[in-house]
Image (cartoon, rainbow, N blue to C red):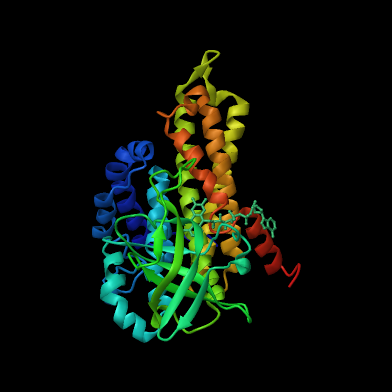
């Protein structure tokens, strides 16, 4: 059965699209060129209720469902994938407090950490990856040891989104807390805690106005209560949270792919070669057709994964499928868009050149394509 978006979802998409076109798009190329993050622009996402879409009303949120949030990130990514990633990661730490925190933590951290994120005044980070442990999260070495009523954290994390932004309030760090039994916990480390250092920003191929840093923890002490939720099994809890992150990331890839299709189609109708628009050539049509088909299919699997999540049904397989398919097909869409534009597509002044660089991270971050295939195979029962 064809599942349409509700009136509310359509209204959110229109509202975010309008804002993205008028307010986000104009400065996107400049932000990419300078690597600058626009704090005022981010705050305006808060004023529009976009940063609060994943939060209940009691936290100041404007809960409109996970699929609506996906539609919003999709529209932002159509014009600026960097900003959509900052948003996606920026709200996640606070959202984890609401979904995984104890009642005491929620009460204590609501005004301090959750509400500022809901308002778009602050962002958070999540640190799992380490220099020597990426896909293999069980191999991570950052240790946290209880000393009285404090955790003492030592180790380093790599490729962490948002960590260097001025409005970052904390990072949720996945730590080995019981080496003997291989147990992990997610521990909140507020920005500015002694022993927690944020390294200079990486120089990146794309997503240049999205902050990415290495982090170091050197006898960094935080209160024992900063462990998120009940003790033990933090890795499983965090990785389950990844299902939502993967669907959101797939949505950013879908947005970028839609835009690549629209830009390439418009250009193909206007650009003449051999006395006719290049859209009339079958080999150009083949690229446009593949892009259009993959955008349709990406939308279907993304929507299915988001709806399963919203209704509390199992969605590990669909989240992995959405991440795999949306990101790989967006990568191809950006490649085809550059091809349709010819030499102009290779120039910085042409948006598809930025899209081509930005989308490259999508098949790597939040679990690579190969890891998504591994998850799908496991969910299919190929192995246990
Ligand atoms: C822009 C960007 C932002 C990021 N933001 C964050 C963040 O905020 N927080 C965070 O914690 N991390 C972040 N990451 C890191 C990201 O999650 C990791 O890069 C990712 O999990 C892969 O780990 P790795 O880079 O160490 O690759 P590796 O794990 O070393 O993998 C290298 C290659 O081997 C393949 N491979 C590995 N294991 C298998 C297997 N079992 N089967 C088949 N193939 C395999 C991979 O698919 C990949 O192709 C970010 C990365 C990028 C690019």
Q: Is residue 238 above or below residue 367?
A: below
Q: Is residue 329 above or below residue 265?
A: below
Task: Tell me where residue 190 sits by quadrant.
Answer: bottom left
Relative to 96, is 110 on the left or the right?
left
Query: Residue at the spot x=52%, y=38% of the render?
Result: 334
Query: Residue at the spot x=55%, y=13% of the render?
Result: 274
Q: How many dots with numbers?
A: 0
Give the x, y percent position of residue 279. Answer: 53, 26
Q: Can residue 126 be spotted in the picture?
A: yes
Q: Is residue 148 above or below residue 199?
A: below
Q: Is residue 117 above or below residue 187?
A: above
Name the quarter showing ligand 1.
Answer: bottom right
Give the x, y percent position of residue 325. Answer: 60, 52
Task: Classify the position of the N terminus by image quarter.
Answer: bottom right
Query: Residue at the spot x=52%, y=58% of the render?
Result: 302
| Outermost right residue | 382
Task: Tell me where residue 65 sits by quadrant.
Answer: bottom left
Choose between 215 and 87: the one closer to the eye. Answer: 215
Give the x, y percent position of residue 370. Answer: 66, 55
Choose between 222 and 237: the one closer to the eye. Answer: 222
Choose between 80 and 298: the one closer to the eye. Answer: 80
Query: Residue at the spot x=46%, y=43% of the render?
Result: 203
Task: Tell me where residue 354 sits by quadrant.
Answer: top left
Choose between 138 and 359: the one closer to the eye. Answer: 138
Q: Can residue 297 be spotted in the picture?
A: no
Task: Classify the position of the C terminus by image quarter.
Answer: bottom right
| Outermost top residue | 275
């Amino acid at each position: 059965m064809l599942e349409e978006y509700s009136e509310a979802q359509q209204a959110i998409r229109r509202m975010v699209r309008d804002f993205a076109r008028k307010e986000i798009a104009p400065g996107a190329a400049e932000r990419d060129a300078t690597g600058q993050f626009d704090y005022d622009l981010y705050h305006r996402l808060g004023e529009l209720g976009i940063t609060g879409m994943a939060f209940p009303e009691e936290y100041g949120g404007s809960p409109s469902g996970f699929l609506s949030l996906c539609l919003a990130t999709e529209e932002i990514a159509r014009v600026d994938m960097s900003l959509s990633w900052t948003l996606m990661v920026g709200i996640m730490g606070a959202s984890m407090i609401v979904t995984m925190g104890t009642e005491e933590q929620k009460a204590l951290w609501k005004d301090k950490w959750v509400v500022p994120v809901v308002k778009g005044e602050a962002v958070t980070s999540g640190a799992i990856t380490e220099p020597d442990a990426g896909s293999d999260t069980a191999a991570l070495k950052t240790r946290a040891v209880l000393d009285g009523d404090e955790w003492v954290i030592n180790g380093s994390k790599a490729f962490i989104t948002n960590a260097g932004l001025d409005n970052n309030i904390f990072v949720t760090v996945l730590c080995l807390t019981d080496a003997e039994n291989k147990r992990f916990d997610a521990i909140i480390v507020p920005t500015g805690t002694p022993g927690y250092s944020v390294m200079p920003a990486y120089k990146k191929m794309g997503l240049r106005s999205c902050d990415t840093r290495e982090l170091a923890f050197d006898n960094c002490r935080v209160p024992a209560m900063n462990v998120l939720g009940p003790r033990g099994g933090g890795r499983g809890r965090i990785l389950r949270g990844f299902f939502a992150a993967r669907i959101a990331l797939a949505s950013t890839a879908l947005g970028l792919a839609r835009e690549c299709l629209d830009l390439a189609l418009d250009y193909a109708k206007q650009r003449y070669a051999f006395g006719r628009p290049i859209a009339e050539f079958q080999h150009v049509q083949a690229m446009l057709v593949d892009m259009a088909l993959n955008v349709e299919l990406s939308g279907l699997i993304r929507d299915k994964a988001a709806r399963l999540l919203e209704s509390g049904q199992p969605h590990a397989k669909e989240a992995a499928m959405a991440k795999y398919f949306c990101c790989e097909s967006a990568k191809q869409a950006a490649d085809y868009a550059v091809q349709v534009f010819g030499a102009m597509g290779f120039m910085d002044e042409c948006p598809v050149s930025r899209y081509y660089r930005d989308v490259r991270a999508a098949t790597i971050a939040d679990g690579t394509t190969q890891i998504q295939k591994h998850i799908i195979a496991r969910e299919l029962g190929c192995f246990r």
